[in-house]
Amino acid sequence: LATTIGKGFVKAPLQELLFVWIFSHTGRDELLYVVEKVFHIVRWFVGLPIAAVFFYLSMQTRKMPKMMLIPLVAFVLGVLFVVITIASEFQEHFNVTQKMEEGFDKVLAFCDKSKPQAESKGMSSYFTAKSMFNYFVTGLILYFITDVINNLARAHATEEAKKVKSS
């Protein structure tokens, strides 16, 4: 029940708000500004020592009992800092933020409904890229709902079986 509430009523709406904000024009600009500032701050003399601390933390906590998630999270954060450091060092050469902005523009152009689109007639309107993506997301949502119902039913059946055995 807690997982259902957490994923269905907390995680999903927060992800939705985050993606709506990121793919809006102001959110995109603010995110690119933050990325540029992070790239400016995290140079090799900052990023690599922070990554080393996370890698050390990962190595030290992986041997401790009941510490399954901490080493993984520390390792992922270490890798993230290495990637950010490399991206910040080669920002001028690879032009990372410009490529991010171009990618955001492509996504916004794909999702922008204010632009006039060609009238599609017949069954072909059901097989556009947007329609296929919508079908995919709808399928994922339906799968999640049926999985939750199945898990609840399985838990209920297990409880009933325990009651019958104990009687």
Image: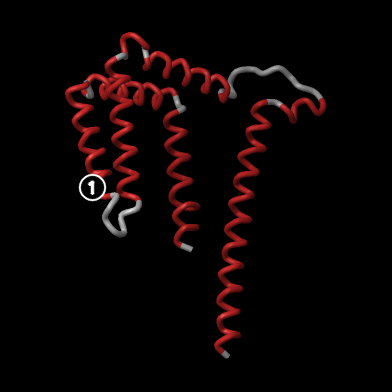
Q: Residue furthest right?
A: 122
Q: Nearer the viewer, residue 162 or 32?
A: 162
Q: How many marks?
A: 1
Splitting the image into 4 quarters, where does residue 66 fall? bottom left
Q: Residue furthest top?
A: 93
Indicate the position of residue 137 as horizontal and vertical percent values: 61, 39
- Relative to residue 155, is residue 79 drawn left or right? left
- Relative to residue 138, is residue 68 drawn left or right? left
The residue drawn where x is 21% and y is 21% is 44
Splitting the image into 4 quarters, where does residue 109 fall? top right
Indicate the position of residue 144 as horizontal and vertical percent values: 59, 51
- Quadrant containing the C terminus is bottom right
Indicate the position of residue 98 as horizontal and vertical percent values: 39, 13
Colouring scheme, one of rainbow, by chain, secondary structure, one colour: secondary structure
- Crowd rating for badge 1 (residues with CA inside 10 Å; few <14, some 14–19, many 20+): few
The residue drawn where x is 37% and y is 11% is 94
Q: Nearer the viewer, residue 20 or 5?
A: 5
Disc 1, SS: helix
What amino acid is at disc 1? Gln
The residue drawn where x is 60% and y is 18% is 115
Q: Nearer the viewer, residue 148 or 52?
A: 52
- List the residue tagged with mark 1: 60
Judge whether 158 appears above or below 141 on screen: below
Indicate the position of residue 12 as horizontal and vertical percent values: 48, 46
The residue drawn where x is 42% and y is 19% is 100
Q: Nearer the viewer, residue 25 or 39?
A: 39
Judge whether 1 appears above or below 107 on screen: below
Q: Residue furthest front?
A: 63
